[in-house]
Amino acid sequence: MSAEDLKSKLQEKLTGKVVILCVGSRSRGDDMFGPLVARRIAGKVAAEVIDAENVPENYLGKIAKLAPDVVLLIDSAHFGGQAGELRLLDPQELNESSFSTHSASLKLIEEYLQAQCQSKVILLAAQPKHVRFGEPPSQEMIGAVDQVCRLLTDILGG
């Protein structure tokens, strides 16, 4: 998906009150995608930004109280793309063969938020190159972080 197509789709979907839930492990290479995005956009977008690290389920009560129209999940996930490639996915598209250290909980998050506050949940995923413990993120993932931060500040700039 081109950067222009991604921006267009995000603009279309990110309407109303938005919560950005960033997910990932700070110690596992490209799984740092979510936390790196959270750190860079917090306070720079007109949305609540939550760095949930690898326990997004711990923030569901807070999100439900905020009653957002849209929850944008940001996480790395294996979807068969090139390293650093970005895709907008429905969390229900993740299956047992998809790798995300959070794939089961992302489905549950979507179901819970739809039931509690009728929030639309979308996933902005980046294809990791590696998720080795103790390794820094790849250059491809750093490029994906840069791109997502530019897109979100353009679309939701506060």
Image (tube, rainbow, N blue to C red):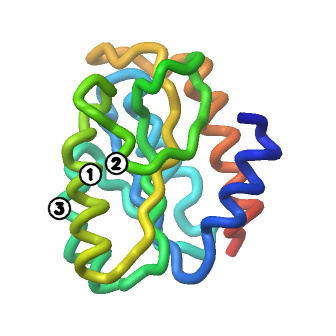
Residue at disc 1, secondary structure: helix
Picture quarter with the C terminus: bottom right
Location of residue 24 in the rendering, given as x and y in whole percent from the top left corner = 34, 40
Is 128 located above or below residue 35 in the figure? Answer: above
Residue at disc 2, secondary structure: helix
Q: CA distance from mark 2 to mark 1?
A: 6 Å
* Residue at left offset 77%, top offset 36%: 2
Residue at disc 3, secondary structure: helix
* Residue at left offset 23%, top offset 29%: 96
What mark, if any, has residue 58 been given in the picture? Answer: 3
Q: Which residue is mark 1?
A: 107
Q: Which residue is mark 2?
A: 92
* Residue at left offset 43%, top offset 34%: 76
The answer to which quarter of the image holds residue 66 is: bottom left
Q: Are marks 2 and 1 in contact (CB under 8 Å)?
A: yes
- Earlier in the chain: of badge 2 and badge 1, it is 2
Left or right of residue 156, residue 137 in this image: left
Left or right of residue 14, residue 101 in this image: left
Amino acid carrying label 2: it is: Gln
Amino acid carrying label 1: it is: Lys
